[in-house]
Amino acid sequence: MALVATEQSILKVIAESGQATVLQINRQTGLSLGYVEYLCSYLVRGGYLNSKGPGSFCLAPKGKKILVSIGYGLGLDKELVKELASQVAKEVAKEIGIKGGVRVSPEKEREKLQIKTDFDFPVEDESLALESNIKKIGTRVEKEKSDDMDKTVRLFKEIHKRGRKR
Amino acid sequence: MTKPKGGKGIENLKGQIQKGKGVDIGTMFVKCAQKESEEIIFRSQRNAFFEVEHTDFTKRILDNSKVKYIIKEDKLYVVGDEALEFANMFNKETRRPLSRGVISPTEKEALPMVELLIKSVIGEPTYKDEIVYFSVPGEPLDADFNILYHIKMVEGFLKTLEYTPKPINEGHAIILSELAEEDFTGMGISFGGGMVNVCLSFMSVPVFKFSVAKAGDWIDQQVSMAVDETASRVSAIKESSLDLSKEKGLSKIESALSIYYNHLIEYVIENIKQEFAKAHRLPRITKPISITLSGGTSLPKGFANRFKQILDQLKLPVPVGSIRMATQPLRSVAKGALVAASADESKK
């Protein structure tokens, strides 16, 4: 599961000192003590942090991996790395004679596959086996004026047509 | 059921019922919208049930008190809002046919229950093959399941009722209902019970849509663990009295709810930012985009303001214009589905 910015900022604070207490994290992030406690226990449960005694935490391998994946603590410019990697890839492609740059990996090719057939089947009405007084009592009914409904439908038809063309 | 071949006969038979229906199949409610004369009629059922002892006496009491129930073999289930009241009375949890926006894989009574609830709100088609748009969640980003089985089951069931069913993304339906003045360009976010659904649309065409499996139920479960209450009780407090603009004098449950609301909103915004980063050819949107918030979890007072505050801190990669609640947060999905159905019907 992806971590949100607040959770990442806690990992960063801990990474800076190797180990940090709830109070240290609270001071550095400005988050309330209660919230820091909650997030740390969530991160421990998720395997991102290890507990080092009461209220003290250090990074678990999964937490370190997350920081690396967002380019934290490597001392490298992520964009520069991307650019260099792209240049190297182009040169390698030239050497081995692939047109248009990098060869698409089999996984990527697989992602592009689309299922074109449809499986249409009748679903049995299992509710027929139930006895109920719902029909007798009825449903909750609410009403609202539909002043602008026809206008909305017309507008939708027009705009949808234009939107599809673009 | 009368099934005339043309539309004219229907007008005479049923007054001014217009063709096409929109159904919101949510984790908490099933709601159907239909236009009659100058009004939109919404019929709804709460998607929850609770097992009680099956005796003739209980059944009679429920009948006399007009409490909805369902009997399957030797089991008696209270259905709808009353299921929640019963659950609170017995300090237990309700059972739900839908979980995380789709037919629950673990609830053995899910399918017949969902079918009965859908049938009770949608009724029979005005004529054979009437178009009905039903809401479906987007593919979840953070959960390992897909929505195909759910779509196919609902679609197949609606066909047995002689409708022509078409799925519509929940976030997209909100845009059709709420963003006509912006040419259906903007973002619709539905904070539901089982999922949060997000759709960015440009001139009514979805640019990206997705869902996350943290939503209202997740808040209830987290708060219930944090303060040792049942999730049903937490949900009842959340729906009846939570005020997110209140900063002082909060009860233990209210404080926990406030913390988890913050967490959920931040989680959703971070996922939206990631989708913007992943999107390849974004259309050139010249004006700041409007965001409409909807769904049962967005109902507490102060929700839109809380969303704005967090968005101000986290920022999206595109300029944002107005952030507002849907005019009727519990009806906008069904209404948007009805707009799509009416547009399709008028093409026939």
Image (tube, rainbow, N blue to C red):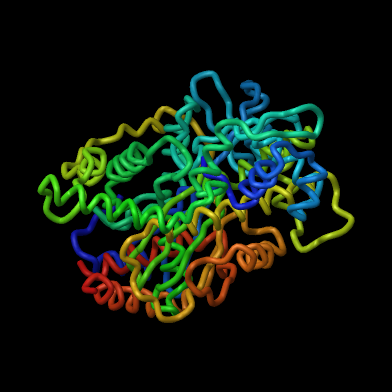
Q: Position of residue B130 (x, y in %)?
A: 28, 57
- Residue B8's place in the image compared with B333, above or below, is below
Q: Please, which residue is most extreme toward the top here?
A: B74
Q: Nearer the viewer, residue B60 or B32?
A: B32
Q: Please, which residue is most extreme toward the right here?
A: B249
Position of B310 compared to B245: left or right?
A: left
Q: Position of residue B15 (x, y in %)?
A: 37, 69
Query: Where's the C terminus of chain B, which quadrant?
Result: bottom left
Give the residue at x 35% y 63%. B206
Q: Nearer the viewer, residue A132 or A22?
A: A22
Quadrant in the rendering for residue B52:
top right
Q: Is residue B339 visible?
A: yes
Q: Is residue A138 visible?
A: no
- The total of numbered circles placed on residues is 0
Position of B31 compared to B163: left or right?
A: right
Give the residue at x 64% y 35%. A59
Position of B8 compared to B199: left or right?
A: left
- Residue B206's place in the image compared with A49, above or below, is below
Position of B253 compared to A107: left or right?
A: right
Q: Position of residue A153 (x, y in %)?
A: 35, 74
Give the residue at x 41% y 36%. B145
Q: Nearer the viewer, residue A6 or B1?
A: A6
Q: Position of residue B196 (x, y in %)?
A: 52, 51
Quadrant in the rendering for residue B227:
top right
